[in-house]
């Protein structure tokens, strides 16, 4: 049997933070721990829900807080979060600040006694892209290779949505992206689309370092439930059909399409569950549309209930983003046994996923007519919706379990450990 791995994980969110990427990394860490590996996590204080450090953690904002666990440790740092989610410069400075102090914390994590500086690998997660260089500096100091885990390709997504327009900022971000990919020993991505995107930015000799490892879905925590949930009561919805967007309410999602659909189907409840930079403007747009209902993020233990509240879930990404982002919530929706309508670039990962499972419909992005027609056909056949949900659940049970994804990471990490060591 191979010796256990000693790993350093650098990520922007970790439990109890509610960010989707935090949920992903938390479960990967726990799965690796179950396999007997030692992990030391460097992350931020919980801040995602309100875009500020949560009240019970405020007293630790300006100092490092380390907790020892049965499998290693978790070191939490200030995220330098700003109140204005639209202020890109402020957010960038926050990421840079967190990335800088994470280097110091990463060089110390897991070194409490004796000479335990060396680790078998450093795993750094992006976004933010700045953690690529932080991870590399930590890896050099810990005499280890770097695995760079890409959840969304930045700055591509920000450029496509118009969040970044300044040519100087784009040039700097492109440079940082290229350097981060090159210094990593392995770059993991969620889909073939993302792999093609990144390999196109690397020399041919580096293309083999980009490895596809999809995200998982917790099929134990997310079980299919009856549609008449307590959360439906909380929102004041009767037994009407519900179409839901659950997740980040940002500018990468074409949520205006949901408002258009709500006007077309006044007898259907359209729920936007979550928060984000675009929520205030979306609420303003939906002010005169009586069947659009907004709900806040719920504790993770209510996720299955929230997802079960809907009869149909929507996955909406603006044109051009399907190849640089894979909404991980798609797997959670499928685990809940619900049908999916995706307005997303054709030929991309989510489209292939829905087609492979036969669990929904994919239409072109930014096209309200296409979305409305897809919803009309599905809503006219409740039995079809139910069957789609059943097929979705069956599909994820076989291909996206946490244990299977963790084992794939172990294989890649062991190859790193057994390969040539980085030199100081």
Image (cartoon, grey):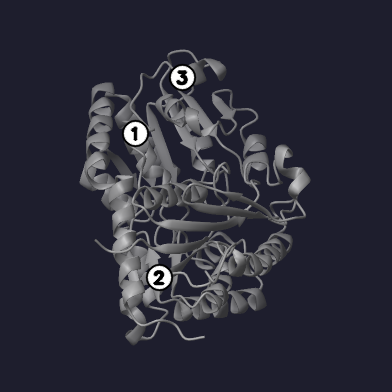
**Figure check: 374 above or below 106:** above
Find numbered disc 2 in the image and state the secondary structure of the residue it sits on. strand
Which quarter of the image is occupied by the N terminus?
A: bottom left
Considering every residue shown, the one lying at the far front of the view is 114
Q: Quadrant of residue 388?
A: top left
Q: Are marks 3 and 2 in contact (CB under 8 Å)?
A: no
The mark nearer the N terminus, 3 or 2, is 2
Height in image: 281 above or below 143? above
Residue 220's disc is 1
Q: Which residue is mark 3?
A: 267
Residue ID for mark 2? 187
Q: Residue at x 71, y 37 (%)?
A: 56
Q: Is residue 392 above or below residue 110?
A: above
Secondary structure of the residue carrying tag 3 is loop
Q: Residue furthest top?
A: 238
Q: Earlier in the sequence, mark 2 or mark 1?
A: 2
């Amino acid at each position: 049997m191979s010796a256990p791995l000693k790993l350093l994980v650098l990520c922007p969110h970790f439990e109890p933070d509610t960010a989707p990427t935090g949920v992903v990394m938390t479960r990967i860490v726990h799965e690796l721990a179950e396999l007997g590996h030692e992990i030391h996590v460097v992350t931020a204080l919980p801040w995602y829900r309100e875009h500020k450090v949560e009240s019970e953690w405020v007293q630790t904002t300006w100092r490092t807080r380390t907790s020892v666990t049965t499998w290693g440790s978790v070191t939490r740092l200030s995220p330098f979060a700003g109140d204005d989610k639209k202020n890109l410069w402020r957010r960038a400075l926050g990421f840079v600040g967190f990335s800088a102090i994470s280097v110091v914390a990463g060089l110390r994590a897991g070194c409490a006694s004796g000479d335990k500086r060396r680790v078998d690998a450093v795993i750094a997660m992006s976004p933010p892209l700045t953690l690529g260089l932080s991870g590399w500096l930590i890896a050099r100091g810990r005499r280890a290779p770097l695995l760079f885990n890409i959840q969304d390709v930045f700055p591509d997504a920000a450029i496509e949505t118009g969040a970044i327009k300044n040519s100087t900022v784009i040039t700097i971000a492109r440079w940082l992206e290229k350097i981060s990919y090159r210094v990593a020993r392995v770059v993991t991505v969620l889909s073939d689309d993302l792999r093609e995107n990144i390999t196109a930015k690397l020399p041919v000799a580096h293309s083999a370092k980009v490895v596809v490892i999809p995200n998982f879905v917790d099929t134990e925590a997310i079980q299919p439930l009856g549609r008449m949930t307590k959360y439906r009561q909380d929102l004041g919805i009767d037994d009407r059909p519900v179409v839901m967007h659950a997740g980040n309410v940002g500018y990468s999602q074409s949520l205006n399409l949901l408002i258009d659909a709500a006007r077309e189907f006044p007898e259907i409840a359209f729920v936007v569950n979550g928060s984000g930079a675009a929520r205030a403007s979306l609420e303003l747009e939906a002010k005169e549309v009586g069947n659009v209902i907004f709900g806040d993020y719920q504790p993770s233990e209510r996720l299955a209930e929230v997802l079960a509240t809907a009869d149909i879930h929507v996955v909406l990404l603006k044109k051009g983003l399907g190849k640089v982002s894979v909404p991980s919530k798609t797997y959670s929706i499928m685990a809940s046994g619900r049908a999916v309508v995706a307005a997303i670039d054709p030929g991309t990962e989510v489209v292939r996923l829905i087609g492979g499972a036969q669990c929904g419909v994919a239409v072109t992005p930014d096209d309200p007519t296409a979305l409305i027609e897809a919803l009309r056909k599905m809503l006219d056949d409740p039995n079809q919706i139910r069957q789609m949900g059943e097929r979705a659940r069956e599909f994820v049970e076989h291909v996206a379990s946490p244990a299977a994804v963790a084992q794939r990471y172990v294989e890649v990490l062991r190859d790193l450990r057994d390969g040539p060591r980085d030199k100081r």
